[in-house]
Amino acid sequence: MNSKLRTHPEYQYLDLMQEVLDTGIRKVDRGTDIGLISLFGRQTRYDLSKGFPLLTTKKVYWKGVLHELYWFMSGQTNIKYLVDNNVHIWDDYPYKIYAGKFKSQKTNAKSQILTKEEFVQRIKDDGKFAKKWGNLPRIYGEMWRHWPTRSGRTVDQLKWVLQEVKDDPDAKNLIVTSWNPEYLYTMATLKDASRFPICHNMYQISNRNGKLSLQLYQRSADLFLGVPFNIASYSLLTIVLAQILGLEPGEFVHTFGDVHIYENHIPQVKEQLARKPRPFPKVTIDPSVKRLEDFTPDKVILEDYDPHPMMKAELTVAGGLYDPATGRMAA
């Protein structure tokens, strides 16, 4: 292929998918028994001054990116906000918890379990039901904006890093983390354990000569379905934070732990690898966004996005609290 064409930054992503296919090892996801092909320890980088890295070899669900990021940044944890905006990327996890609670009962309550579609409609229509079943505590929004402490107070990590970089432009401690062992996996008590796996678990920002860069560490990365979303989301976060701080956007650096392709996604991956990237689009933020509280999805403008057609694949609802008695994740 022409070397000039290979300079397109999207080839970092495509080449990583090819490397997984060529050299990855096979693993099996505990709790679902779905096979995947995996590499460990990789990194890609995107210069945000040269276009917004919304992948073009398949259409990325931009509305979902926008609303999910706002959901995180505003500290929310209940999927009702997303459902009300017709974004359904988080429906599976609360439904899994809901259905698991009923299936564990030995009464005729099992016959009353709502289908996933009925469950989502109830979340939309019934505020009390949504409050009971739509919440996913101790996930990204809560941990970014309301980190729980032993004294009962909460820490707004996102607001803190913004203030810290204003106070000390050369700061090296500007980290927001979602990884709290108190609530994760078998480190947690059964009562406290989160049923949702924290995947993109830590990011750090840095002022580099008037440009704001952000590095994400993602301990587990579904390369076909999740990573395109993650690239767009954290690149947009970088741009929004840069504007709030009066800086220019710098780089989005994406560092991976376990990066993998699920075996049931391989046909779609091969089809995507046959496509050639198109020019990246542009993103601008309304100048009225000067504080965290000013940011809402309608303040973002995406221009010149011309991707290849969307490609669908089944989401693997993996991770969480493993129950050795059943060989599945606990409800």
Image (cartoon, rainbow, N blue to C red):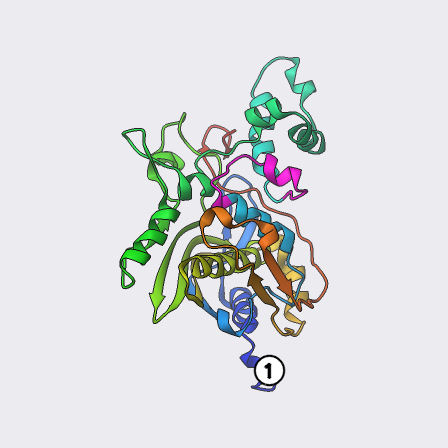
Residue 98 at x, y = what percent? 58, 27
Magenta segment includes 50: no
**Which amino acid type is shown beneath numbered disc 1?**
Leu
Relative to the observer, which residue lies in front, 64 or 271?
64
Relative to the observer, which residue lies in front, 312 or 267?
312
The image quadrant of residue 184 is top left
Whether residue 274 appears in this view of the structure is: yes
- Span shown in magenta: 72-88
Residue 25 at x, y = what percent? 48, 59
Magenta segment includes 76: yes
Return the residue found at the far front. Answer: 288
Residue shown at 58% from the left, 64% from the top: 283
Relative to the observer, which residue lies in front, 75 or 178?
75
Residue shown at 56% from the left, 26% from the top: 131
Please give left or right for residue 76 compared with residue 162 in the image: right
**Residue matched to label 1:** 5
SS type, badge 1: helix
